[in-house]
Image (cartoon, helix red, strand yellow):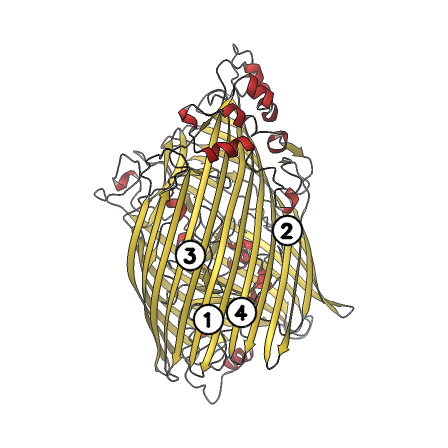
């Protein structure tokens, strides 16, 4: 992961059900189009056919193979794709699938497990599980953070970068389709444990708070539930501003020793995890039934000692704020998986159920200056972010006759994010000689000489989806597929935030007390401390997206070495965001969205086998990108990871993308290749961020820029070198994997262009965006190099992995006259080492793994720079981590 603090062997080595659809033409649920194999196969082709097929489950039920028959899906597919098999994922040594995908050409991992394709943000990346969509528990994201998925769950990961009509139209940079494991061929039980030493956290000073007695599980014991007075107030539908609410009674119940008393931990513990997976299958008459179970638990501590600075001047010559913030997060993950599968004849029915519960217990202490004054500020934050994902999928893959395949799929997923009692306090030391308390930190709870706030946030999203696909092979040259899909998503997002309000008559000396004493019931009652609600206009929203789609595509082997796939997809979507009435008297808010759009999305890909081991591809397509719910909701949201406040724009529109790519692939041996490609994208109405000041605070919002273009090139090399005899054991080889992606993007903005921003006094595009600026989140250069020593006869691998991503815009600067420079993130170089060794102990298989991550100690850097002047927006050290793990299979 980009923080360098990955807990290796994270979570369970569990498995799920998936049918191996990437098989031969006679396999169930699969069709391939291929020319007859030549009478004499080349060694590379013969080795490929002898290899085991990776399991891939996608919409449409098949990867259509053109040209010669090949088990290598990257080579045989009609599209530009990469497939990581379970073996290749294991070779990376990553504990979660986001880390493994970071090794794929053109992919980069940003933040907590969000995978970007070709440097584009997550809005241009689509993530599926077994071909079905997943909701995200992250309010700011469209897709699920992929670091929630341990690699043991995944049988394969497909990354397709050229669009085909069987995928949803929200396809910008590419699609990532995760396939869970298949019905086991034999019974097994695997148990694993791991421990990690993080040099920035383990045995270091950190902070925490008590919370509740069950926090170690990732579940609250009820201590964070709404107190009775607050629950009664919310149920009443009253407004605090009306003046008839006893806010003192509410305030007296909100803060206590458990949720606000920050404690030092002199020596943070090491990270650890445990997991199990098991499976069996048995005959039911002539048919086969399989069962797979898995589960895992992870406890991880991270420490960030960050410098956070900000400036409102264009040349950054003066600082408006300068803070040192120490953040200690305790991340607790529990998950489980249950899979049932039934095979009868050439048909398969699979039922897969996945549960992930991911919690962060957050504590932060900050000290610094702001507002260009002489006072010092001490800030304290405690929070509990509880995320949960439940997903169930039912898939049927049927083959009633040899040349006909029918695939049916349906799914339900629910994601939740619960953030109760986000507490924040600010104490002020005026340093004034005439101030009796000027040498002490004081909180007078008046938002001038100290402040306190608490918020309660809830997100609940339900996603129902279904689809049907029919594929018919007319002969070895022509295959046709038609299908349809439907999805319905509903999200409710609620945030109730309150500011503590003390009268001016409260003595300054009272403000010397720590938060739990300052807001103890007796103090609240005696000094008449009350509450103000910070947003009475739009505290709750209902967001909906209903999408209907139908598509058809045709694969034609025109001649023996020339294949063509053409398709078109029709999508109709209704997307809305509507304020929910929570008060008895409606607010009259106009912050709503209603988008009703229809699209025809064509796609075509040509594949020409110019030589026996050289093939060329060309593809063109049109796709779309819809605004995310969080980007539409006019409701403030604080992201503790980036230390930024976000506010949605209800006036956003869909983006449309026009894509083209040329690619050459040379396969010189089995599993070895060199590829080179060039790509181009034009984006109409791209959704981009901008930064403004609201109430004196920097706030990030969103708007449609007029246009953008993106172009670039990719190259990839995979090569193995056998080490025969001598010093080296039999079967030893050196494996080299290297890839590089160059991407250049530019916004296109002219003075006559207009934008639509809710509640803004300006609609001139140049007031928000700069012509020629790069897209946010996009690195010009991404490179990965893996150099490994491995044995082909038994498990023994030692691998060095070097990754690089160039500077990328992570947030915009203030767009004044002249504008500020953008906020830059500098990922830089990162070096990892992984060693895996297999043993046999008392007849059982034992795997030992040692990992050294971020060996170079690459820090996290976010900064602004104007000439020689640089300010650190969010910069902190990320030290090396060292992990040891063992897994035993019975």
Question: For the residues marked 3 and 1, what is the alpha-carbon distance in whole angstroms?
Answer: 19 Å
Question: For the residues marked 2 and 3, what is the alpha-carbon distance in whole angstroms?
Answer: 27 Å
Q: Which residue is mark 1?
A: 74
- Across and down, in percent, residue 667 comes to 47, 74
Does any portion of residue 457 appear in the rendered image? Answer: yes
Question: For the residues marked 1 and 2, what is the alpha-carbon distance in whole angstroms?
Answer: 34 Å
Foreground: 652 or 521?
Answer: 521
- Element class at badge 2: strand
In the figure, is residue 790 to the left or right of 135? right
User: Do the residues bearing badges 1 and 2 touch, measured as CB atoms within 8 Å?
Assistant: no
Q: Which residue is mark 2?
A: 298
Graded by Cα atoms within 10 Å as few (under 14), some (14 to 19) or many (20 or more), the crowding at tag 1 reads many
Q: Which residue is mark 4?
A: 350
Q: Quadrant of residue 222?
A: top right
Say whether disc 3 or disc 4 marks the residue closer to the N-terminus. 3
Question: For the residues marked 1 and 4, what is the alpha-carbon distance in whole angstroms?
Answer: 26 Å
From this view, report whether residue 147 is shown above or below residue 699.
below
User: Do the residues bearing badges 2 and 3 touch, measured as CB atoms within 8 Å?
Assistant: no
Say whether disc 1 or disc 2 marks the residue closer to the N-terminus. 1
Foreground: 451 or 66?
Answer: 451
From this view, report whether residue 723 is shown above or below residue 228.
below
Question: For the residues marked 4 and 2, what is the alpha-carbon distance in whole angstroms?
Answer: 28 Å
Q: Which residue is mark 3?
A: 125
Say whether disc 2 or disc 3 marks the residue closer to the N-terminus. 3
- Across and down, in percent, residue 519 comes to 57, 24
């Amino acid at each position: 992961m980009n923080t360098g603090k990955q807990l290796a062997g994270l979570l369970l080595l569990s498995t799920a059900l998936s049918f191996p659809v990437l098989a031969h033409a006679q396999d169930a649920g699969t069709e391939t189009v291929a020319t007859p194999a030549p009478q004499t196969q080349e060694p590379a082709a013969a080795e490929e056919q002898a290899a085991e097929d990776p399991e891939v489950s996608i919409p449409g039920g098949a990867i259509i193979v053109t040209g010669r028959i090949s088990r290598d899906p990257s080579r045989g597919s009609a599209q530009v794709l990469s497939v990581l098999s379970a073996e290749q994922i294991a070779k990376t040594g990553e504990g979660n699938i986001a880390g493994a995908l970071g090794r794929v050409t053109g992919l980069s991992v940003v933040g907590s497990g969000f995978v970007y394709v070709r440097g584009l943000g997550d809005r241009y990346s689509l993530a599926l599980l077994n071909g079905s969509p997943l909701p995200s528990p992250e309010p700011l994201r469209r897709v699920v953070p992929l670091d929630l998925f341990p690699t043991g769950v995944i049988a394969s990961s497909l990354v397709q970068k050229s669009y085909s009509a069987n995928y949803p139209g929200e396809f910008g940079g590419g699609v990532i389709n995760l396939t869970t494991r298949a019905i086991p061929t034999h019974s097994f039980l695997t148990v694993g444990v791991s421990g990690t030493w993080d040099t920035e956290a383990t045995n270091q000073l950190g902070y925490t708070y008590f919370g509740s007695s069950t926090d170690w599980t990732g579940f609250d014991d009820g201590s964070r539930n709404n107190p009775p007075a607050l629950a009664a107030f919310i149920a009443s539908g009253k407004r605090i501003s009306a003046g008839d609410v006893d806010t003192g009674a509410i305030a007296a119940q909100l803060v206590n020793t458990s949720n606000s008393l920050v404690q030092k931990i002199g020596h943070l513990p090491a990270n650890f995890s445990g997991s199990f997976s098991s499976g069996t299958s048995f005959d039911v008459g002539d048919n086969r039934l399989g069962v797979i179970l898995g589960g895992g638990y992870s406890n991880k501590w991270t420490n960030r000692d960050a410098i956070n600075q900000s400036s409102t001047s264009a040349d950054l010559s003066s600082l408006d704020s300068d803070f040192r913030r120490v953040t200690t997060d305790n991340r607790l993950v529990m998950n489980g998986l249950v899979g049932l599968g039934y095979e009868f004849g050439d048909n398969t029915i699979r039922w897969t159920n996945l549960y992930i519960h991911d919690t962060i217990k957050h504590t932060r202490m900050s000290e610094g200056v702001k507002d260009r004054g002489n006072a010092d500020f001490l800030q304290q934050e405690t929070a509990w972010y509880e995320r949960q994902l439940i997903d169930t999928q039912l898939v049927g893959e049927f083959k009633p006759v040899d040349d006909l395949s029918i695939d049916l799929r349906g799914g339900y997923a629910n994601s939740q994010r619960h953030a109760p009692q986000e507490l924040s306090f600010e104490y002020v030391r005026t340093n004034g000689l005439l101030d009796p308390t000027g040498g002490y930190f004081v909180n007078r709870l008046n938002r001038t000489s100290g402040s306190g706030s608490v918020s309660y946030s809830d997100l609940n999203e339900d996603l129902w989806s279904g689809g049907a696909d029919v594929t018919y092979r007319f002969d070895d040259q022509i295959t046709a597929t038609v299908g349809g899909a439907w999805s319905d998503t509903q999200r409710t997002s609620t945030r109730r935030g309150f500011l503590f309000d003390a009268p001016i008559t409260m003595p300054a000396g009272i403000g010397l007390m720590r938060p739990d004493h300052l807001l103890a019931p007796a103090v609240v009652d005696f000094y008449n401390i009350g509450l103000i609600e910070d947003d009475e206009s739009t505290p709750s929203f209902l967001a909906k997206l209903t999408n209907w789609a139908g598509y058809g595509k045709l694969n034609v082997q025109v001649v023996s070495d020339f294949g063509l796939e053409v398709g078109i997809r029709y999508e109709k979507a209704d997307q809305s965001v509507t304020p929910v009435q929570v008060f008895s008297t409606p607010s009259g808010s106009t912050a709503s969205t209603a988008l009703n759009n229809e699209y025809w999305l064509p796609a075509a890909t040509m594949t020409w086998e110019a030589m026996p081991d050289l093939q060329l591809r060309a593809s063109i397509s049109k796709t779309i990108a819809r605004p995310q719910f969080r980007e539409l909701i006019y409701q403030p949201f604080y992201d503790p990871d980036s230390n930024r406040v976000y506010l949605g724009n209800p006036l956003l529109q869909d983006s449309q993308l026009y894509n083209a790519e040329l690619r050459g692939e040379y396969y010189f041996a089995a599993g070895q290749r060199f590829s080179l490609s060039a790509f181009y994208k034009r984006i109409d109405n791209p959704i981009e961020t901008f930064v403004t000041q609201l109430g004196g605070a920097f706030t990030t919002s969103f708007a449609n820029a007029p246009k953008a273009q993106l172009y670039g090139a990719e190259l990839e090399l995979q090569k193995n070198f056998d080490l025969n005899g001598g010093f080296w054991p039999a079967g030893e080889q050196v494996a080299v994997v290297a890839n590089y992606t160059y991407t250049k993007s530019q916004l296109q903005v002219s003075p006559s262009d207009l934008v639509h921003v809710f509640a803004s006094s300006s609609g001139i595009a140049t007031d928000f965006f700069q012509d020629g600026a790069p897209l946010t989140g996009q690195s010009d250069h991404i490179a990965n190099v893996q150099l490994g020593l491995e044995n082909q006869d038994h498990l023994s691998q030692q691998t060095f992995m070097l990754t690089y991503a160039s500077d990328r815009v992570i947030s915009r600067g203030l767009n004044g006259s002249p504008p500020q420079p953008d906020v830059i993130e500098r990922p830089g170089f990162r070096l990892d080492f992984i060693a895996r060794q297999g043993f046999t102990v008392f007849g059982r298989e034992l795997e030992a793994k040692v990992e050294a991550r971020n060996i170079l100690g690459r820090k996290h850097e976010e900064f602004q720079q104007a000439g020689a002047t640089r300010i650190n927006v969010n910069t902190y050290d990320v030290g090396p981590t060292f992990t040891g793990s063992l897994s035993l299979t019975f």
